[in-house]
Image (tube, rainbow, N blue to C red):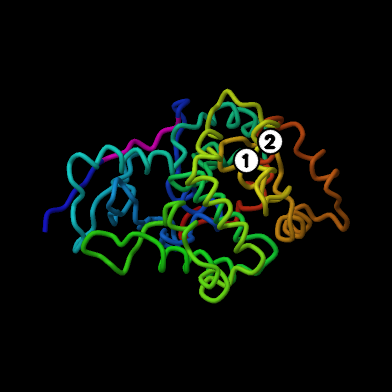
Amino acid sequence: MATWSSAIGLVGAGGEPVDLARTLLSHGVADLPPNEIAADGTLLSTVLAVGEGAWLVELTSDGSGRARVRSPAGASAPPAAHRPELAAQIHHMLALDEDLSGFYLLAAADPALAWVAAGAGRMMRSPTVFEDLVKTICTTNCTWSATVRMVSALVRELGTAATHVRERRAFPAPATVADAGDSFFRDVARAGYRGPYLRALADDVASGRLDLEALRDPTLQDDEVADRLLTVAGVGPYAIAHMMMLLGRYQRLILDSWTRPKYRRVSGRARITDKGIERAFRRYREFAGLAFWLTLTEDWLPPGQP
């Protein structure tokens, strides 16, 4: 069976280095289906949809400042016409279009965060804003195991099967999610109150009433992006902060039931408030939320790495 391989330079838009493992392990949502990420951050396996089909691809570092995207053994190589789009999706997922050089200059002056300039700080994304928002809604007010159950059901039951690897599937298109019946969300995904929200979101995107991909527009102000997200049922302050980070807007801090106690532990403070946390990272200006997140995740190091 024919295979395919292509190289992608691990360098940011400002010429800064990109640590592939740190990017793949940047946040837990990145590891939800259809993605499978090695525990040490050395491999991403995922299914990407192009046109009417879907393709299983793997991404690894080649050890020379580049990543290698390929069709793994046993999977079909995508047609030549689809390969540029697949490479572009991977490029977007790794946030290689982001310029973090300004953030690295700020971090270099902070002994607690100087380590990030080696290539940390990119928040791995999904190919579409729709996929990221659905996954984010599935993290609200529930355990992580419930999030995994809901997203896994969406992909397993509704996603397009990868060519010649039918057990792996891509994230479903908005129209497919919109057409899923109430019983799917109630009995299979067991999405609870999120079911109607997810169906409405998918229907709005599929019909063109809501253009989530327009939120990538760098000319939009942060407040405008946040206001548009707030119109989506099921989206509140936490979901907005999470989505803003995935959209490359790093000022807002993700404050939730995990980040608050984690910050208390790493800061050694007996008592913290949201306003106090925000003051502590104000010097990072438009990168305050990113600096906060990296402070909490510094210990997410791949085994064997310093």
> Considering depth in this image, is 165 or 180 the residue closer to the camera?
180
Label 2 near label 1: C-beta < 8 Å? yes
Question: Which residue is pictured at 44% across the width and 42% down the height?
Answer: 94
Q: Say whether residue 105 is left or right of residue 54.
A: right
Between disc 1 and disc 2, whose residue precedes?
A: 1
184 to 216, vertically: above or below: below
Residue 224 sits in which quadrant? top right
Q: Residue furthest bottom?
A: 187
- Please check the rendered image and state whether residue 10 is part of the magenta-colored stretch, yes or no: yes
> Considering depth in this image, is 228 or 255 the residue closer to the camera?
228
In x, y percent, where is residue 13? 45, 28
100 to 29, vertically: above or below: above
Circle 2: element type: loop
Q: Say whether residue 77 is left or right of residue 200.
A: left
- Please check the rendered image and state whether residue 50 is part of the magenta-colored stretch, yes or no: no
Question: Which residue is pictured at 59% across the width and 54% down the height?
Answer: 136
Q: Amino acid at mark 2?
A: Gln
Residue 244, numbered circle: 1
**Which residue does the numbered mark 2 point to in the structure image?**
251
What range is drawn magenta here?
A: 7-12
Q: Amino acid at mark 1?
A: Met
Q: CA gap, disc 1 to disc 2?
A: 8 Å
Question: Which residue is pictured at 25% across the width and 50% down the height?
Answer: 70
In x, y percent, where is residue 130? 51, 47
In x, y percent, where is residue 259? 71, 55
